[in-house]
Amino acid sequence: MYMTTDQIRDAYLKFFEEHGHTIVRSSSLVPYNDPTLLFTNAGMNQFKDIYLGKEKRDYVRATTAQKCVRAGGKQNDLDNVGYTARHHTFFEMLGNFSFGDYFKKEAITFAWTLLTEVYKLPKESLMVTVYDKDDEAYNIWKDIVGIPENKIVRIGDNKGGLYESDNFWQMGDTGPCGPCSEIFYDHGEDVQGGPPGSPDEDGDRFIEIWNIVFMQYNRKIDGTFEKLAKPMIDNGLGLERIAAVLQGVHSNYEIDLFVELEKTVASILGVSDLNDKSLRVIADHIRSCSFLIADGVLPSNEGRGYVLRRIIRRAVRHGRLLGAKEVFFYKIVSKLVELMGKAYPELVAQQALIERTLKKEEEQFLNTLDRGLALLENELTKLGDSKTVPGDVAFKLYDTYGFPADLTNDVVRDRGYVVDMEGFDKCMAEQKARAKSASTFGIDYNKELKITENTVFTGYDGLESESKIT
Ligand code: ATP
Ligand code: MG
Ligand code: MG
Ligand code: MG
């Protein structure tokens, strides 16, 4: 059944409201009071303290449409944009949450009812995964929902250790954790890719649309698990992914909202091929950049601001690929505000700031972009048969021309090259050491260039040390 992105969001919130959930506004992309998390990357982030038992609210069921950014931190989808049909740097996660109220049976049947009765998805096109030790979830899918057994896949510890699995979620090294169950949509034989659990699962045919987390244990400091007295639910459905399904297209980048953005970019830059990958990258990046600025992040050389700067520079480079002769990125903002301003009024309120910031940032980068690209091309011709861009070249591009290492990688990736990141890191460390000795003379040229080790709370993957945000 065709539904617009706005209709899908509304229908989700309405469905869960009718089932006793309180509609809660999206929280900011800058996590409140949580220095361990780079950006909000899941619906559950704003409820973390409730799950940890540190906070109580006057409701036990909640539903949200949450702004998420997965770029730069542990959950980094920046390098997937332009390469898969299902990843964005910014996306909306539709969520429903139970804080010690309902559990597995209700969570699974809510999801199934919404998908098959409200969104009217054909049951034959859906597949699910469960954690292999979770017979309870398996049996609910089989006996209560009635899914044929060949459509239920058990996923074990596939990530290298005990309870290290795509289907076992942990908030951190300790704390609430438990198995999960994911719902996949089969986009059909003409799309490349295999079912979940198969070697070819990363293709675009079987797309994960919904992730249900059953928090039923507390992991203690000694690594043992104790059962939670009141288990909890954390659910997330990707809005753009379900929109692709309901609009009968194979890629998130072909849904109503993205087509409008892509058309806008195409008309600004005079591009005729609407399927050009660079159009998609720019349409993705204008969303993350605008939403981040609206939430108070500004381009800088460190932390969150540096992730924003990296995304902007990648967008600018893709504009160049499409033939942009002058500053263009900020011109897409008004269209985005028109498309999403109703659901997210902060975009309307901050439109002027967003445009000004993007314009200035692009102007600055344009001064060095062409010269950096020319230098890079020249270096590539010197490589002969090697497909590795030396670290010192990537570092020169970074240091002199403002090319973040991931941008250099994006430039050369389609031609089969990779950047020697170890070499790049070494050059960076050397420069920091030089700057330190220079500072004994009272001048620290690198004062603004703090590349810190950040500990990032990743929502779904736990606490992890993030090496470098360059
Ligand atoms: P994938 O395996 O496809 O990368 P995930 O398992 O990392 O997805 P979750 O962390 O389970 O994703 O997030 C819950 C839901 O949010 C996913 O089922 C998906 O629908 C959506 N989602 C996750 N990452 C993205 C993204 N980068 N862009 C768009 N939607 C996303
Ligand atoms: Mg992912
Ligand atoms: Mg997944
Ligand atoms: Mg998942």
Image (cartoon, rainbow, N blue to C red):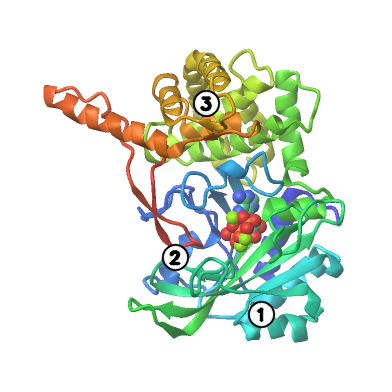
Mark number displayed over residue 286: none
The picture places residue 328, in percent across and down from the top left corner, at 61, 20
How far is disc 3 from disc 2 in space, using C-alphas?
32 Å
- Tell me which image quadrant ligand 3 sits in: bottom right
Q: Please tell me how crowded label 1 is: few (under 14), some (14-19), or many (20+) other residues with Cα within 10 Å.
A: some
Name the amino acid type tagged 2. Answer: Lys
Would you name the residue on which mark 3 appears? 358
- The three-letter amino acid code for the residue at tag 3 is Leu
Residue type marked 1: Glu
Q: Which quadrant would the N terminus be assigned to in this image?
A: bottom right
Q: How many marks?
A: 3
Earlier-in-chain disc, 3 versus 1: 1
* Picture coordinates of residue 191, whole percent (x, y): 82, 51
Q: Position of residue 207 (x, y in %)?
A: 73, 57
- Residue 435 sits in quarter: top left
Residue at the image position 63 percent from the left and 34 percent from the top: 416
Q: What residue sits right under mark 1 in the picture?
A: 106
Q: CA distance from mark 3 to mark 1?
A: 45 Å
Q: Quadrant of residue 298?
A: top left
Mark 2 surroundings within 10 Å by alpha-carbon count, few (fewer than 14), some (14 through 19), many (20 or more): some
User: Which residue carries the number 2 mark?
Assistant: 48
Please name the residue shown 48% across and 44% down the image: 72
- The answer to whether residue 332 is left or right of residue 57 is right
Residue 46 image point, x, y percent: 47, 60
For marks 2 and 1, the one nearer the N-term is 2
Q: Secondary structure at mark 1?
A: helix
- Position of residue 109 relative to residue 80, above or below, is below
